[in-house]
Image (cartoon, rainbow, N blue to C red):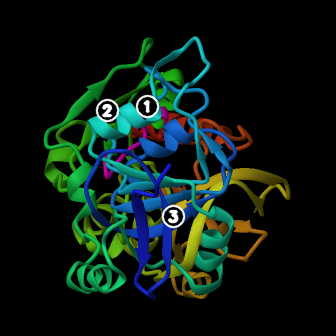
């Protein structure tokens, strides 16, 4: 088999391999994911919009794509980079191959490269721009394309819904207004299972539009890109804090932190995978978490805000959770809903439900 596709990194490195998925060239941010399973959820996670993901686990595609396992109905990943691809899945739930789904949604892929070497490069030198292109593209041509093209900064606008969407619970107890910056479907499932009907709102929803829904709580979702690119969400949090219980995950965690005056910075290569130990400082317990983010909250800046540090990453000391008890606001950087992955952190959804119960009880006593 002859190489027909290649990667060109902005520092001049080249990797030759074989194409699958959609055809064509794509400029992306290059990142890696350490998960051993769950490539369907990774492919369909809106947080990967515009990113080319290197899977460190060598064999991908072997169990196909199941109809009920997507995190969104319109995957927007930039590209997928593998060591070995299996195009003949063995799984009674499979309805399509990974390549067929990627072709349907215009996502290019490459396999047959040394993903260990590429991952070490990302670890040592950080995330960079990469061109996924035809093998005939020269290094000079590729570097010119990379210099002329920037990674998109309007990624939340690409994945946030244009109009509100309603996800009713089977036995509704509460109504949650979710600011949808690219929300994973399993978050909706976790809330529905706890009696929370979810109204997913566009990221640019105004304070008045949220309050007109009379929600019992506000949820801030995960999503792609730099949190400073969506200042309208940060301002919305400032206006709503203290009025409703608020829970944020991943990008939502960063937006809450910005709203309270904390600072954000970009990590060298981000956290992506299901094996990060996080210490819950309130209980002393260690949670094995699933993560997917490029940015983190500056821990030193929290001292100048009303926020309290609640969770700490034991690998690099980064902020993994914060809260403002007075305002009934809390958030985590990792994904408690993650599937596949450990279920150590599912109780955070119960904590949100308890906050809404207390809020509704306090509101009833005022009248």
- Is residue 295 visible in this depiction of the protein? yes
Distance, label 3 to label 1, CA atoms, is: 19 Å
Viewer-proximal residue among 231 and 351 = 231
At 61% from the left and 53% from the top, the residue drawn is 83
Q: Is residue 136 magenta?
A: no
Q: Quadrant of the C terminus?
A: top left
What segment carries the magenta color?
180-186
Give left or right: position of 266 versus 55.
left
Q: Is residue 100 above or below residue 153?
A: above
Q: Is residue 56 above or below residue 180?
A: below
- Is residue 248 visible in this depiction of the protein? no
Image position, residue 160 (x, y; %): 24, 48
Give left or right: position of 340 versus 98.
right
Q: Is residue 184 magenta?
A: yes
Distance, label 2 to label 1, CA atoms, is: 7 Å
Marks 2 and 1 close (CB-CB < 8 Å): yes
Q: Which residue is mark 3?
A: 293
Image position, residue 324 (x, y; %): 54, 64
Which numbered marker is on residue 289? none
Q: Examine the image and state in which quarter residue 332 appears.
A: bottom right
Helix, strand or loop at label 2? It is loop
Image position, residue 233 (x, y; %): 27, 63
Helix, strand or loop at label 3? It is strand
Q: Is residue 294 above or below residue 51?
A: below
Helix, strand or loop at label 1? It is loop
Of marks 3 and 1, the one in the foreground: 1
Which numbered marker is on residue 73? 2
Give left or right: position of 219 versus 266.
left
Q: Which residue is mark 1?
A: 70
At 77% from the left and 71% from the top, the residue drawn is 315
Question: Looking at the magenta stretch, what is its main secondary structure?
Answer: loop
Viewer-proximal residue among 215 and 273 = 273
């Amino acid at each position: 088999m002859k190489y027909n596709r290649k990667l060109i990194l902005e520092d001049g490195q080249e990797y030759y391999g074989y194409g699958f998925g959609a055809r064509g060239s794509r400029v992306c941010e290059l990142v890696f994911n350490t998960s051993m399973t769950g490539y369907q959820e990774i492919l369909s996670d809106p947080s990967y919009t515009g990113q080319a993901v290197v899977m460190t686990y060598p064999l991908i595609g072997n169990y196909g794509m199941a109809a009920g396992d997507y995190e969104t109905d319109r995957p927007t990943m930039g590209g997928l980079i593998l060591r070995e691809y299996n195009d003949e899945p063995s799984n009674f739930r499979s309805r399509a191959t990974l390549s067929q789904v990627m072709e349907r949604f215009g996502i290019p892929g490459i396999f047959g490269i040394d993903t260990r070497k590429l991952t070490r490069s990302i670890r040592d030198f950080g995330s960079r721009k990469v061109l996924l292109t035809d093998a005939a593209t020269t290094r000079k041509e590729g570097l010119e394309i990379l210099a002329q093209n920037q990674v998109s900064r309007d990624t939340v606008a690409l994945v946030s819904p244009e109009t509100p969407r309603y996800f009713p619970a089977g036995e509704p107890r509460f109504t949650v207004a979710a600011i949808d910056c690219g929300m994973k479907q399993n978050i909706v499932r976790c809330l529905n299972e706890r009696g929370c009907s979810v109204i997913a709102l566009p990221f640019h929803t105004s304070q008045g539009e949220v309050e007109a829904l009379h929600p019992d709580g506000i949820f801030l979702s995960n999503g792609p890109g730099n949190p400073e690119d969506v200042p309208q969400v940060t301002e919305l949090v400032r206006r709503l804090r203290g009025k409703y219980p608020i829970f944020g995950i991943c990008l939502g965690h960063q937006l809450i932190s910005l709203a309270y005056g904390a600072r954000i910075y970009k990590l060298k290569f981000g956290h992506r995978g299901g094996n990060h130990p996080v210490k819950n400082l309130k209980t002393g317990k260690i949670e094995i978490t699933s993560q997917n983010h490029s940015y983190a909250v500056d821990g030193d800046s929290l001292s100048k805000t009303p926020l309290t540090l609640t969770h700490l990453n034991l690998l690099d000391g980064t902020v993994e959770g914060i809260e403002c008890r007075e305002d009934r606001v809390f958030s985590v950087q990792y994904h408690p809903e993650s599937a596949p992955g450990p279920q150590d952190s599912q109780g955070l959804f119960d904590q949100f439900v308890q906050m809404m119960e207390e809020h509704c009880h306090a509101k009833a006593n005022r009248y």
